[in-house]
Image (tube, helix red, strand yellow):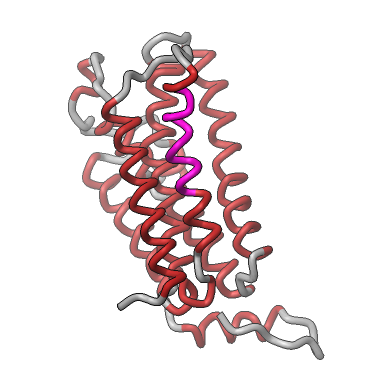
Amino acid sequence: MLPRKPLGFLIFVALAVAAAAFVWFGLPHDREVKSLGLFLVKLLPFVFATEALARLDVDWAKRLKLPLITLPIAFLVFFLYFVPKIFFYGGVETGTRESFYALYYHVLTLTPLIILTITLANRLGGGTPALTRRLAYGMLLLMLSGLEDLAFLTVNDHTDPAYATIPAVWDWASHMTVFLGHPPTRNEAFAFIAVHVVLALLVFFSPQRWWDALASRVRPRGTRSESA
């Protein structure tokens, strides 16, 4: 049987997930607030999630290495669903090429800030230097992997025939081109993504002694180490 604190946390997580699913799949995606009751219902996922976080037993979470699992997952939900949707609706379908480029640049700049914000919150909450580096560098590798490019092609309903299927050459993926020396083919892009995902997983779940060795090199003499 689960201890009391994790049980309360898990109950509110389940309530938050259920409420979020109801709001997302059961209610219309309207820009306008039609009624006070509907407004309050749409706030329920946030309230339940907040109560779950307030009840989280930090020591229990650390024993299960939840920061290394939940924080990258939260980042990937943002990066692999909402970012492609932002690009699709905000620039590709309705905007000009110039507006899309401006939007792309701002989101491109925002994403590392999101990574650092997540990492800062973890560090201020007691995360160790090793965990801080794992999270920041691992999520950066996921950002640079090309996963978002693949998600853009797969989570959106494209009307442009050029993107209705995964293109044979990814000529827009300049971050891959600068590494490969040419626009990647579809298979090269898949390989590029796979390598970066494997590297990110190695960062997240590599042996602790690697990070201890790194910390010993960058830590000023006389300071006390923190274990991950």
**Residue nearest the observer in this picture, 155 or 30:** 30
Decide: is 42 above or below 177. Answer: above
Image height of 35 relative to 122, above or below: above
Q: At 55% across and 41% down in the image, what residue appears?
A: 111
**Quarter holding residue 102:** top right
Residues rendered magenta in the picture: 39-49
Q: Residue at x 25, y 15 (%)?
A: 160
Quadrant holding the C terminus: bottom right
User: In the drawing, does residue 210 fall left or right of residue 170?
Assistant: right
| Location of residue 170 in the rendering, given as x and y in whole percent from the top left corner | 31, 34
Examine the rendering and report whether any part of residue 45 can be seen.
Answer: yes
Residue at the bottom extreme, as displayed: 222
Majority secondary structure in the magenta region: helix
The residue drawn where x is 47% and y is 71% is 61
Q: Which residue is located at x 40 percent, y 71 percent? A: 202
* 77 up-or-down from 99: above or below: below
189, above or below 73, in the image: above
Q: Quadrant of residue 158?
A: top left
What percent of the width, then of the height, locates residue 131?
55, 71
Residue 83 in picture, x, y percent from top left:
43, 33
Q: Which of these two is toward me, 16 or 131?
A: 16
Residue 183: tell me if it is visible: no
Specify whether 95 is left or right of 10. Answer: right
Relative to 218, 25 lies left or right = left
Specify the farthest residue to the left: 165
**Residue most toward the right?**
222
Q: Residue 22: image x %, image y %?
A: 30, 34
